[in-house]
Amino acid sequence: DNIFPEDPEDGLVKANMEKLTFYALSAPEKLDRIGAYLSERLSRDVARHRYGYVCIAMEALDQLLMACHCQSINLFVESFLKMVRKLLESDKPSLQILGTNSFVKFANIEEDTPSYHRSYDFFVSRFSEMCHSGYEDPDIRTKIRMAGIKGLQGVVRKTVNDELQANIWDPQHMDKIVPSLLFNLQSGERTESRSPSPLQASEKEKESPVELTERCFRELLGRAAYGNIKNAVTPVLMHLDNHSLWEGKTFAVRCFKIIMYSIQSQHSHLVIQQLLGHLDANSKNSATVRAGIVEVLLEAAAIAASGSVGPTVLEVFNTLLRQLRLSVDYELTGSYDGSTNIGTKIIKAHEERQLQEAVIRTIGSFANTLPTYQRSEVMLFIMGKIPVPGIHLTLPSSDSGPEGTRMIQVMLLKSLVQVTAGFQTTNMLTALPSSFLEPLLSFSLTEDPEVRLLVLQILLSLIDRHENRPKFANMSSISDISVLKLKVDKFDNLFRLLNNIPHAQQLYRHIYLGCKEESSGREHYETLFALLGLLSVELANEEVVVDLIRLALALQDLALSTDEALPVYNRCAVHALVAAYLNLICQLTTVPAFCQHIHEVIEVRQKESPYLLPEAVFVDSPKYVPAATHKLEGSVLFLQSKITESLGGSGYNTERLATPYVPQYTDEDRLSKRKSIGETISLQVEVESRNSPEKEERTPAEEITFETLKNAIVDSVGMEEQERERRRQVVEKFQKAPFEEIAAHCGARATQLQSKLNQIFEITIRPPPSPSGTISSGYGQSQSRSVPIYEMKFPDLCVY
């Protein structure tokens, strides 16, 4: 009693308090009775509204608690917590804050002995309630909320490391703690967005509720073990759902940034798995919500890169691709369940588009965190999902039909563009098996210009290892390519893609056919030029150079061909592409005669026909002469004979150079989405006689021209009509003719068959071997007539 002064204004009587503390330390067994008495007195004072004495009693309890770290502190703590509870139950903010401060001091004490019977449920509930305080005075409201946050922080500190405590990670506690923290983070954002007054700005030493909340939230997450991550993240997802916070993105992204940076890095894939699960659960929600979740995933994936994306790499991509497919279906069908009920929500196409873009960006972000071997797996996985009309549809489309198939093709190829961006490998053979390149190249034959452009971009990303691609962005016929500062790696044998893989001819053929497409535009030709340029720089050896020069000359012939129905712009574009490419390759090969010929032609073109050079064609408003671009001749053309002659002197294979390039057609072309394969160039089909390898000579090549193909189609139509007529007559005969006639007809056919069979048996059946070597007749002459097997008489022992 002596520690309480007569006037509460005077504060605690210090001398007497020191005596009490000394007594408590020297006789620790008395501590619980001291605590019980003080708490009883404090309860009385609270009831009588003598708040001065309440503060003094609390201060005394605090001092005793701080001083006495002995083993018998447990019972004293009980009475201390009872008092704190009493203060927190009071409706006066000052008492609530006083109680909280005492609790926080207690929370910072590390006890030696565990307590078996202490419960913190009340404190979790009460502090969470204080975090949501709606007190009228904004200053007091802020103080109460901050006290609530500090209290929660205290509870977490006190319980998280104590095995015997009520598990703070249980959903019942987490569902109160996490939303309380998020509520303060969010409300703080709102007040921060208003401009602070100069007075507030100067008080920087005061910690704002938002900073405190963030610190508390980080501490909570930092203490989470592997098994507790899920319980900590689930309330966050629920809070963002309940308050529609996905749509704004910024707050959701901020929350997950805090989470990803606070948890231990090896657990980061658990958060990503939960986000993916949540995305699936919301697959029928509005596009803005799904886009928000995907945006959060994007940020989380970038942070998770430092740890790991976890064991389920393909599951991540599977979920994202499924969302892409659903989004395309929703956009095209206009509803979430394929039906048009009155209750269905209206789908906004532009929101779905934004979602699709976000998913594609996220796929790229995830891929960038993976090592090379996993990235090539992901590329194969996405390639397997791309639908090829008429062959397979691995992502079955419910209602969206062919337009849906086209859209999903474009989306998945865009994803591949993201995945392959910056993809670098030392060995193309292992990183890009034919199971990836072949389907990819088959897409470059589609009639859809957008799909073709995406395929070319993917090929560029795969081939470019020295970041030369931007240097080929502007096609030109400059006389000195050293200004491009190309990085060329001369001695890299691992990466000889075109020598090691039988894809070389395929790749050339796709470049050739890409130039033939009428729907190809400026971007296509620029990308094709970049592809040719990268092939020359990355993979340049003599054989490749010879093949690429032959390809360039074949393209020039294509632009001159009268059979082709190419528009004038495309003809000029092909000429310009050839000029730009030959200008590049001649300077890479550094053969003076070759360079001289190319530069002469370019100079003539600059004077007489600038519309055949890239500077005139690949601009926003191209100037070209529409008349007779296929009748060009003489000095404006690159001549095969001159090129062969100039390169022959430098040891290049002149025989191969002199052979015009003709693309070979394969089954893959016929399976691709061409509407017809009646190509107008003659294609050489060489049939080698594989049965007799000892014979040196080949069968002469059969030439199939457009005419023969046309005749074959016309003939087959006539044959079909004759066949149809014959069938009609047979059916009619069996319907109308008398039975006897039909029977006679069938009988005649049966006897005819029998006689034919007898003839065959006569020819084929040899006489069976007899013990004497020949079958003798009764007259001693050897009998030459063969005995059919079915007429032979076998001994009984031989017959089963």
Image: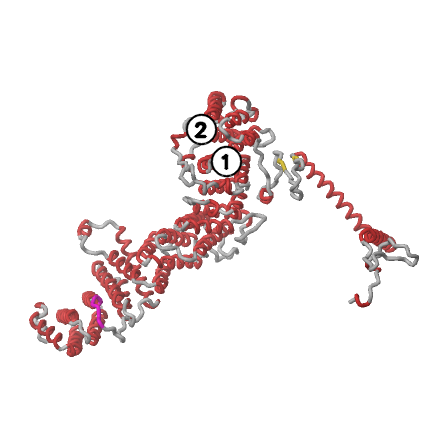
Position of residue 525 measured from the top left corner of the image (x, y, whole percent): 49, 34
For residue 153, what is the image quadrant?
bottom left
- Residues 522 and 586: in front is 586
Query: What stretch of residues is rendered in magenta?
Result: 107-112
Q: Give the labeled residue for mark 1.
A: 544
Label 1 and label 2: CA atoms lie apart by: 15 Å
Verify whether residue 111 appears in magenta. Answer: yes
Verify whether residue 549 appears in magenta. Answer: no
- Label 1 or label 2, whichever comes before in sequence order: 1
Q: How is the image coloured?
A: secondary structure
| Res 106 seen here | yes
Position of residue 794 measured from the top left corner of the image (x, y, whole percent): 82, 64
Mark 2: secondary structure: loop
Q: Can you say which quadrant of the picture contains the C terminus?
A: bottom right
Residue found 26% across the figure and 50% down from its top: 194
Q: Residue furthest front?
A: 772
Position of residue 389 measured from the top left corner of the image (x, y, whole percent): 57, 47
- Residues 124 and 433: in front is 433
Query: On the picture, is 115 further left or further right than 567?
Result: left
Query: On the picture, is 109 further left or further right than 693?
Result: left
Q: Residue furthest right?
A: 779
Q: Give the labeled residue for mark 2.
A: 590
- The amino acid type found where label 2 is placed reads Thr
Mark 1: secondary structure: helix
Query: On the picture, is 408 further left or further right than 670?
Result: left
Whether tag 1 and tag 2 are in contact, CB under 8 A, the answer is: no
- Count the labels in the image: 2
**Main SS category, magenta section:** loop
Position of residue 219 measured from the top left corner of the image (x, y, whole percent): 27, 60
Question: Up-down: is 375 above or below 683?
Answer: below
Residue found 43% across the figure and 44% down from its top: 426
